[in-house]
Image (cartoon, helix red, strand yellow):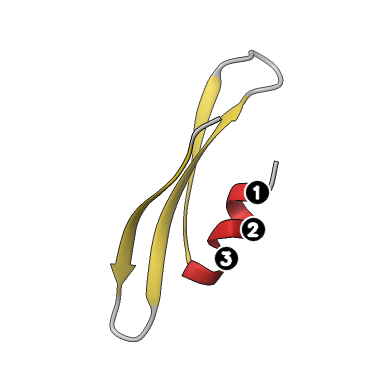
């Protein structure tokens, strides 16, 4: 399964990271991409979550 941090985004006072994770759908078996924008400290928890 591919995991990748795509971009670091910076707003006026907060640093944010856009993360894309690939997941396999339990119904169809096809892969789908889950995107989220979050603080850099939370990236590892998001990528390790199944």
* CA neighbours of label 1 inside 10 A, class few (<14), some (14 to 19), many (20+): few
Query: Percent x, y for residue 14?
Result: 38, 80
Quadrant that contains the N terminus: top right
Residue nearer the viewer, 31 or 27: 31
Q: Residue at x 60, y 54 (%)?
A: 46
Instruction: For mark 2, give the secondary structure.
Output: helix
Q: Is residue 39 visible?
A: no
Q: What residue does disc 1 label?
A: 48
Left or right, 12 with respect to 16, comes to left
- Identify the secondary structure beneath mark 3: helix
Q: Is residue 3 above or below residue 19?
A: above
Which residue matches tag 3?
42
Task: Single out the residue that lies furthest toward the bottom.
Answer: 13
Residue occupying image coordinates x 57% and y 65%: 42
Report how far apart the C-alphas of labels 1 and 2 lie in the structure: 5 Å
Q: Where is residue 50 shown, x and y percent of the image?
A: 70, 41
Residue 41 lies in quadrant: bottom right
Q: Are marks 3 and 2 in contact (CB under 8 Å)?
A: yes
Cα gap from disc 1 to disc 3, whole angstroms: 10 Å
Percent across and percent down for residue 20 are 45, 44
Q: Decide which of tag 1 and tag 3 comes sooner along the chain.
A: 3
Left or right: residue 1 compared with residue 12: right
Q: Residue at x 64, y 23 (%)?
A: 25
Q: Are marks 1 and 3 in contact (CB under 8 Å)?
A: no
Q: Secondary structure at mark 1?
A: helix
Residue topped by disc 2: 45
């Amino acid at each position: 399964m591919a995991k990748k941090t795509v971009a670091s985004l910076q707003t006026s006072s907060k640093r944010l990271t856009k993360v894309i994770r690939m997941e396999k759908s339990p119904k169809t078996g096809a892969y789908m991409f889950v995107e989220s924008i979050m603080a850099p400290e939370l990236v590892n928890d998001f990528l390790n979550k199944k």
